[in-house]
């Protein structure tokens, strides 16, 4: 049976919302009951308020908050409605672009993790020709876990990217051999060639030379990696090769993916040339 006035529960059911939602709109002076019984306090709504409720819910879907919606109703006309739709359309296009970027990023990360979770090349040396790459270098040498975390934070702040750097192989360490035959380590983050160059005192943009590298996958702690590098160095020297530049250590599976330190997976890349 059709009736003009409905209880708050009946009116809420028309749009599959809760009675509390209508009470919230009432408290906000956005959509007040048509009639309140003075004796019982029951709220009653009119079917003629259905259009306004539908509009409120649609504007909420467009991302407007209640204050913006109230202002819209206070100044509603065809011109303002057109302007509103145009503005929301532009924002929607921006959101779609972000979602497309995020979708591609997640697709890459899924593929990346599948590759390295099923890798058959752990602790096996392989010779590869690797092209020149561009990276951000955190200028401060790494001596503690705290410095690593600060370095990650500064490099990500520099990029200001939309998608988080989670489950990717863009972080790494550049190890430089000094005159005392000791390794100095610096955090790096691989970047796109078209990266702009803002002024940032703690970050440099560097190019990692291309050429012949011996690569291997190594699992475990940082000490395990350093020992593995030393073993590779000794093995290469025994086969007539010498290290010709900085060693690159890429994090293929990091702590954002696994909470177990022993499950961390690194790719070691050592540039070499024959004696």
Image (cartoon, helix red, strand yellow):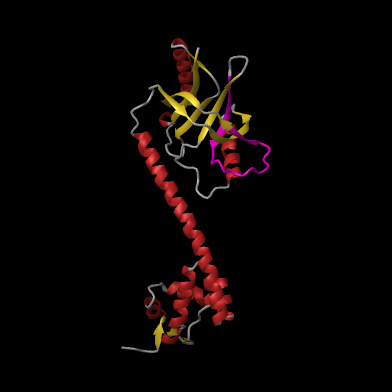
Please report the residue visible at 49 percent of the width from the left and 64 percent of the height from the top.
92
Q: Position of residue 152 (x, y in %)?
A: 56, 38
Please report the residue visible at 50 percent of the width from the left and 22 percent of the height from the top.
271
Q: Where is residue 3 in the image (x, y as percent from the top left)?
A: 36, 89
Please report the residue visible at 33 percent of the width from the left and 33 percent of the height from the top.
118
152 shown above or below 239: below
Q: Where is residue 223 in the image (x, y as percent from the top left)?
A: 49, 22
237 shown above or below 207: above
Q: Quadrant of residue 265?
A: top left
Please report the residue visible at 58 percent of the width from the left and 23 percent of the height from the top.
176
Q: Is residue 29 visible?
A: no
Lateral position of residue 52 relative to residue 14, left or right: right
Chain part drawn in magenta? 183-206
Q: Can residue 213 be seen in this view?
A: yes
Name the quadrant of the N terminus.
Answer: bottom left
Is residue 235 in the magenta section?
no
Front-most of 54 and 112?
112
84 shown above or below 5: above
Is residue 205 in the magenta section?
yes
Front-most of 137 and 44?
137
């Amino acid at each position: 049976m059709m009736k003009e006035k409905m209880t708050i529960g009946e009116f809420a059911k028309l749009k599959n919302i809760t009675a509390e939602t209508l009470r919230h709109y009432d408290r906000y002076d956005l959509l007040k009951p048509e009639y309140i019984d003075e004796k019982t306090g029951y709220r009653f709504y009119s079917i003629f308020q259905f259009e306004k409720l539908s509009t409120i819910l649609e504007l909420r879907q467009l991302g407007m908050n209640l204050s913006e919606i109230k202002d819209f109703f206070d100044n509603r006309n065809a011109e303002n409605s057109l302007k509103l739709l145009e503005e929301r359309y532009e924002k929607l296009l921006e959101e779609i672009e972000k979602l497309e970027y995020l979708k591609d990023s997640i697709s890459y990360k899924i593929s990346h993790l599948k590759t390295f979770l099923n890798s058959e090349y752990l602790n096996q040396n392989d010779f590869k020709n690797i092209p020149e790459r561009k990276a951000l270098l955190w200028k401060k040498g790494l001596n503690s876990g705290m410095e690593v975390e600060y370095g990650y934070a500064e490099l990500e702040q520099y990029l200001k990217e939309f998608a988080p750097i989670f489950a990717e192989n863009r972080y790494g360490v550049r190890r430089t051999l000094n005159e005392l035959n000791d390794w100095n380590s610096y955090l790096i983050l691989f970047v796109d060639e078209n990266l702009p160059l803002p002024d940032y005192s703690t970050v440099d943009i560097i190019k990692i030379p291309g050429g012949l590298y011996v690569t291997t996958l190594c699992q475990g702690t940082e000490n395990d990696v350093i020992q593995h590098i030393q073993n590779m160095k000794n093995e290469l020297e025994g086969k007539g090769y010498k290290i010709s530049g900085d060693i690159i250590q890429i994090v293929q599976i990091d702590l954002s993916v696994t909470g177990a330190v022993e499950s961390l997976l690194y790719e070691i890349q050592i540039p070499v040339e024959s004696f």
